[in-house]
Image: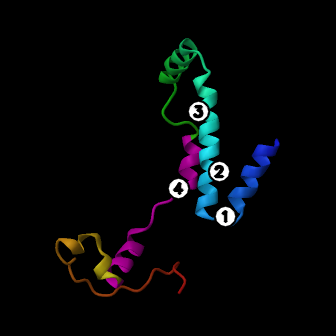
């Protein structure tokens, strides 16, 4: 691991201020911008052509395993408890539903 990679890894885990984090992000973006400005146009064009043949997403099975859907039972329980925060509350009040029990998997 090079020194910059080590610093980035440490910074991601440290409680840094927003100003310090943004300074680091700006440094990395500007460094990348300077590197990309040196790439010849024909090389950039070839890269764009090659990328056009790549799929939009790769490793989708792994990505799908990492994502989960929030059960409708939980959403119903949440919206009934918090009617004022229901997405429809700005237009009209959500239909009044009896207070359901919290889902069994939800710890109080």
Instruction: Check whether the beta carbons of the residues at disc 3 and disc 2 lie within 8 A of each other.
Output: no
Measure the alpha-carbon separation of dots 3 and 4.
32 Å
Measure the alpha-carbon separation of dots 1 and 4.
28 Å
Mark 3 or mark 2: whose residue is earlier in sequence: 2
Quick check: 67 left or right of 97? right
Query: Label 4 belongs to which residue?
Result: 67
Q: Nearest the camera: 9 or 85?
A: 9
Q: Is residue 73 magenta?
A: yes
Q: Is residue 97 above or below residue 11?
A: below
Query: Label 1 belongs to which residue?
Result: 16
Instruction: Check whether the beta carbons of the residues at disc 2 and disc 1 lie within 8 A of each other.
Output: yes
Residue drawn where x is 38% and y is 79% of the image: 77
Mark 2 or mark 4: whose residue is earlier in sequence: 2
Residue drawn where x is 65% and y is 50% of the image: 24
Q: Is residue 78 magenta?
A: yes
Query: Label 3 belongs to which residue?
Result: 33
Give the mark count. 4
Instruction: Check whether the beta carbons of the residues at disc 2 and disc 4 lie within 8 A of each other.
Output: no
Asked which colour scheme the image uses, the reply is rainbow
Q: Secondary structure at mark 3?
A: helix
> What residue range appears in magenta?
60-81
Q: Secondary structure at mark 1?
A: loop
Q: Is residue 94 above or below residue 48?
A: below
Measure the alpha-carbon separation of dots 2 and 1.
11 Å
Query: Label 2 belongs to which residue?
Result: 24
Mark 3 or mark 4: whose residue is earlier in sequence: 3
């Amino acid at each position: 691991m090079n020194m910059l990679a080590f610093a980035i890894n440490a910074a991601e885990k440290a409680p840094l201020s927003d100003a310090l984090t943004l300074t680091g992000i700006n440094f990395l973006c500007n460094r990348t911008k300077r590197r990309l400005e040196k790439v010849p146009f024909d090389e950039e064009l070839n890269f764009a052509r090659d990328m056009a043949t790549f799929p939009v997403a790769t490793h989708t099975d792994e990505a799908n395993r990492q994502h989960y859907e929030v059960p409708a039972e939980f959403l119903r329980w949440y919206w009934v408890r918090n009617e004022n925060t229901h997405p429809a509350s700005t237009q009209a009040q959500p239909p009044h539903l009896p207070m359901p029990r919290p889902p069994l998997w939800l710890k109080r």
